[in-house]
Image: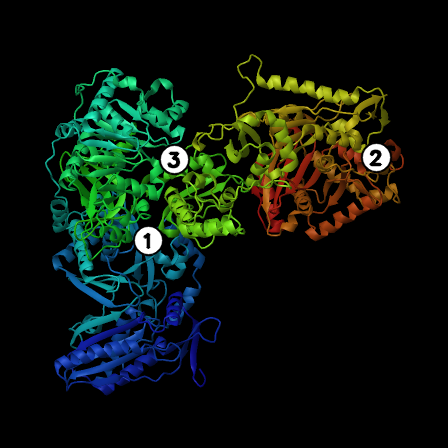
Amino acid sequence: MNGVQIKNIYRLTPMQEGMLYHFILHPESEVHFEQTVITMEESLQLDHLDQSFRDLVERFDILRTVFHYKESKKPLQIVLKQREAAIQIEDISDQTQDEQTAFLEQFLVKDRRKRFDLEKDLLFRITVIKLSESKYKMVWSFHHIIMDGWCLGIVAKDFFHIYHSYLQNKKAELAPPYSFSSYVTWLGKQNKQEGLSFWRDSLDGFDQQSPLPVEYISTGKGYQRESIVFRIDRETTANLEQIARSNDVTLSIVFHSLWGLLLQRYNYANDVVFGSVVSGRPSELVGVEEMVGLFVNTIPMRIRSESKQTFSELLRQVQQFFTATSSYQYLSLADIQSETALKQNLIQHLMVFENYPLTEDTFDEDGKGGLFGITDVQGYEQTSYDFNLCIIPGKELEIHFIYNALAYSDAYLQKVRAHLNQLIQSVIHNPDQPIAKMQMVTDEEQALILQQWNDTDMLVDQTLTIDQLFKEQVKKEPHQIALVDQEGTYTYQELDDKSDALAHVLREKGVKPGSIVAVMVERSTAYSLAILSVLKAGGAFLPISTDHPSERISYMIEDSGANIVLVHNPTVAYAERILPASTLMNLDDMSLYKGVTSDVQTLHRCNDLAYVIYTSGSTGKPKGVRLHHVGIANLQQFFINDLGITQKDKVLQFASISFDASVWEFTMGVLTGARLVIVSKDVVLDPEAFSQYLQRHEVTVATLPPTFVTYLEPENFPTLQTLITAGSAANWELVHKWSAHCRYINAYGPTETTICATTWTYEGQERLPQQVPIGKPIANTKAYVLDVHGHLQPQGIPGELAVAGIGVADGYINREELTSEKFVADPFIAGSRLYKTGDMVKWLADGSLEYLGRMDNQVKIRGFRIELDEVENVILSQAGVKEAVVLAKKVQGGDTSLIAYLVWEQPEWNRDLRQELLTTLPAYMVPTYIHILEKMPITPNGKIDRKALPEPVMIREAGKQLNPPVTEKEIILAEIWKEVLDLEEISVDDHFYDLGGHSIKAIQLVARLHKEGIEVKIQTIFQYDTVRGLAGYLDTVNRIRTTKAKDKKELETLIYAHFQVRSNYVEVPFGNKNRAVLYVEGNARDKHQEILSLLRMSCDPTIQPHAIHYRDLLQKAGEKEKHQYPEATLDEKESLPWQERLVNDLDQKLLRYSEAIVNQQSFIKQPLSPSQRYHVQEKDISGTVIRFEQMIETKLLEKAFLGVLERHHLLRCTLAFEQEEPYWKEYPCPSEIVLPVVDVSNDSDDRKDEVRQLLLSEYFYKQDDPIGSLSYKVILLKESEKEYSLIFPASHLIFDLISSEVLQNDINLYYEALENGTDLSENDRNTYWDFVGQITKGPVGIEDQQLMEEFDLHAFENSLLSIETQLPSSSAMDGYTIVTCELDMDNTQETENARIPIALLARFCKRSYGVQKAPIFLMNFGRSFMGNHFFDVLGECIDHIPLHIDPSWSLDQLETYVKARLDVTKERNIHFTNIAQNPDVTEKYPLSNQTLMRSLQMTPMICNFLGEQNKSQPSEYDHLFIKGKKRVLFEASYTSTGKMTIFMALPYRADERKLRVILEEEAKKLIGSPLVIR
């Protein structure tokens, strides 16, 4: 910038900063390059034109502006006084028209590529291209950073005015221009935070992008600008203008609303946001309409609608929103987006409604048609968005689609144009119609969807039931084999006869149409036998897998109303454990088939209920789908006519019986005359055995989940002719791999549509969509893609798939509301019903459907349909789970797995939640990954931000330490695991299923191990599911720990090494807590005490179990007891309440404990301390609760407590009086004691809470007469094997706050010494009598008068008296007032200092009672005097230090004053309670004594700073400490997080609201932070 003259320097606007940033980032980009081409049929004076340009540059500062950013901290715009400017001339008048056209095209491209250097170039240039003497093209090019489109009109008008003046040889008369700098100044005065707050509130809750969807075109790098221009005819334009006028809105608002509705339909939403370009010119700024600069801005336009809302109502709503934005349109889009959930992804495209087009009217100065023959104006602008919508008003609206051809096709956008026009016509037809009725699809598209793509009608005999269809096959080929499994075969006739016999038995047991019979058998011929028997009897079958937990099975049977359950030998034992024996019928009981074998009379019809399938339900319970016979009849014809299944086929039965795919396989097999080949679960789990089994039985048709097929090789299935994949998404690799070997079909269908709704067959298509299609609707089935309002969606636009036809189910059992929601009338076919699947799909060009995902929280994983809400609800029902979110995500290897994210109530909990969930959920519904979070990520509107949850790949790394393999065996196994699970690293302690493993992965793992010569079964992987565990199993090593066990595996190994029994250590929920339970084989029950002793001595306390249960460990994991702990053992039905019985029993134990001490004959008299004399009168209570989180040996604890009794004399003392003078009777320490124990370890969690509260209320909060009895009680509460509480209620006579720490430290010290066999030397420890001897010596080195002066006791008393006169009389003090508040401070050290509560109390005294100085008794530990410290002594030592505080002191002054007084008490042996209560001292200090006694007899102001507190002991804020106490108590404590709690109690009724105001105001003055009143 050297050598140039500067006129002005100012900062950039936010919009300019954004453009500068983009320029620096992408200097080669054409974004923000503005180019306008004006065609003029007029002879031009080029010299005058050139001079006019120089004058124009001189006129407007912004045209002489450059941008300085490389060498400055913040970018600046600099206005130069002068700039050289000249028009570039290109004369091509001698070229042909074609040559001129080519030149123009090339020139415009070159001009844009020339771009601008923002630091030095003139950022506005004009090129005049001469085409002929009377025709010119003017190219105006400028960078958007200096001005916007509005300015172009201003600049052009002035430019041609100047030029016109030169032509007339006169000076141009133009008013002085307004400078852009005034706008920059105005901008600097705006309240940015207020603006951000507005946009944050306006966009609150918007978290889903709303783009203009693209068709199958990949977005490449770069930008290929194309445009589509079309017009809205005059009549339509006039109608739209009329709608705008009648609703008091602008035409711009009409188009914003229309575009918003279009986007809503395209995005299946009722809430969308897109970018809207606004002028950005504040009306209050003088001359803003004539300013030249960059004002234009992009703001988010949010369009929200409701179904019942009319378009007119929407217009007014959008206008209201737009008007509200007007005060905040100056904020940059970047700033606005930063306040939203989507950040920079909030906006995907722009809408520009041009209010300032550059036309001939721009230059019409005299209203006579303008100065020049401007015949055309064309603009070029490129944004960073792939799509922009520009609307130019006029008698005919002109609409421009400006787009990136690398992202959108012309054909696609022509459809967008048609849909927009359809909405326009709908609005014009009736602007007051509900939005829900407005159509977007054209008539042509509707005809295509309904008449061509859904032409599926096929003749089906709808009078036949499933069993009748089977009978037809029996008649055709009675001796054809119908079923085959590993046990044997059935011919059609054999199966018919046997099922007839069983059907008669079922009919006799009451089965009829509508009856539901449960079928609980393994995959075998028994399944087909069972369902045919039930159907022949007229009932409906309910298949149930034994893989389900008992709780789920019981629910399904109860919900369905099934009172008969068909089982067979492999499942009968399991069924008998969980179901009433009276409901069971064993199919292997041969007596069932000895009756009649003739046909059963048919009572049912084709529309009757045929079967029920339970699927996952969002409530946490599965839901039963009711299916009828006719749907299966249709499926049978589809198999025969469309799939070509014949009696020559061998159809595989692969699916678990509880899934409808098993019904599909049954139908395809025995209802077509084919053979059904049934494969057992064990064979399925062994890939080699599976392929051999299919080869041996020459299977020709198989329906398999894609996830299973992935691990199979086509060459191993030479007889397979048709492979159908279903249940989850297939991939193209799978299609190409198998289609070369056999016919490949991909099928789709919810249970609610009789298994299958659509199929797609690969026929060598070349142009393939991104996903493998789910195909076209099958026979007699209709498929609709619907928007949120139930209208058809056109090709390429996502919507919900709805299925209609004869296969649609009746609905759900006992779920009428859900049935009404999901099963609705078909709007396109009268009398038909459709099922809303909740699946998002879109039509492809050939009429096939592409699956896009779920609308709701339902997913399919490995073919299993799962409601994520159900999994979430079950997790949330587990004890201690605070929040839970379950997602389905693709993990390593491309598999989809369930991921659970949860927050514990207590962050330190570490539980095997997967094991707990297996008791309620089937294994396939238990999340593979469980990720523990401290808290859930939250969106700005307070919802859980699911997008911010960590990726599954990070979960293991975040949750576990990586332990690499060490031994040779571990290294081999780890490499195989990494290969199978597609992981880069693995820990030897990672669980196979936690890393994404599942049954199919286990199959692959076993196969790989076999290749390495490692022979293991699938069951071995289930039992030893870590590399370390499997390596240990293979090496047959029993590792016996010589040190304390520190984890589950070490503990289980420890038990085995000592007792040769297996054990299982698990953590289970129990009420609102977590419990560790050790399950041990039942034959070790008689070794219980030995096991307890081993665990105490050889296990770290953190791993010790809370309970030990003995059981059969071979029992299924899913069949653990529902309650790991028995219910309360106390019998509430007895006549005496359990509370009274517990107290009576405990009182006897406490009496025996006390008698062991006080029934001794000898004792020693000991004096009371002065503090104790005070508490004899006040009778305050104290105490503590000590928690033990480890296994405790009670006898050892009693010995430890005996050591505490020996050490602390007051625990062996009773209070006595002699001539009204109190003293202590100190008894010898007994030789042994028995601690009173209350054992609730076998009780429910609720009962434990009740007992805990009972003990506190009976023994903590009740004051016993201390005369003749111990001044405390001790109770050991056993809550589990490793949870104990020592409850110690005591009188303040013997116990204060420090005593709690002393007692806890000493008990732990003695217990650990006894446990470890070490001695304790305690010769140098003080006793309470040492303390009493120290303070009763009295003050040293200070006289009575000096003491009065040092502590200002006379004035202290007067101040207290002044307060006393203002308080209610004693008779009126019948109540109390409590205020509790919290204080958060940046400086956590400040909370550890007593000066804030002291200062706050002082200020309260001044505000409330008007005293100039506050008389405050500061409670002091009173344990340090003249170099002697008594912090290891149990007993009451507290003193009250009188402080006379000036409320105006600063905190530092106050701290200096208080410290000095405390130092004096320590150095001079001053204990004020001693001076007030000790007769021996009273004589020497009469003034001090009398002043203190009078002060204490009034209403003392007591400040008690408790220091850091936890919640383990009973609160001293209980009303028992307040009621009847004539004192103002001001207590303060803090937590480790820096939060201070302040508690104030007044001994009279006061206006609580006023007290809060005083405390809040004084806290604000004192430290600048407000109190939070609770």
Q: Residue at x 24, y 87 (%)?
A: 47
| Total number of numbered discs in the rendering | 3
Q: Nearer the viewer, mark 1 or mark 3?
A: 3
Helix, strand or loop at label 3? It is loop
Amino acid carrying label 1: it is Gln
Spot occupied by residue 1483 in the image (x, y as percentages of width and height): 89, 34
Question: In whole angstroms, how far apart are the C-alphas of marks 1 and 2?
Answer: 76 Å
Q: Is residue 1552 left or right of residue 394?
A: right
Who comes first in sequence, dot 1 or dot 2?
1
Write down the residue under mark 2: 1332
Q: Which quadrant of the figure has residue 944? A: top left
Q: Is residue 1341 left or right of residue 62?
A: right
Q: Which quadrant of the figure has residue 724? A: top left
Amino acid carrying label 3: it is Pro
Q: Quadrant of the C terminus?
A: top right
Question: In whole angstroms, how far apart are the C-alphas of marks 3 and 2?
Answer: 69 Å
Spot occupied by residue 594 in the image (x, y as percentages of width and height): 25, 16
Q: Residues within 10 Å of mark 2 (few under 14, many from 20)?
A: some
Task: From the viewer's side, name the closer residue of 459 and 596.
Answer: 596
For the residues bearing labels 1 and 3, Cβ distance under 8 angstroms? no
Amino acid carrying label 2: it is Val
Task: From the viewer's side, name the closer residue of 1060 and 1328.
Answer: 1060
Who comes first in sequence, dot 3 or dot 2?
3
Tell me, yes or no, if residue 945 can be seen here: no
Spot occupied by residue 250 in the image (x, y as percentages of width and height): 24, 56
Who comes first in sequence, dot 1 or dot 3?
1
Q: Quadrant of the N terminus?
A: bottom left
Write down the residue under mark 1: 209
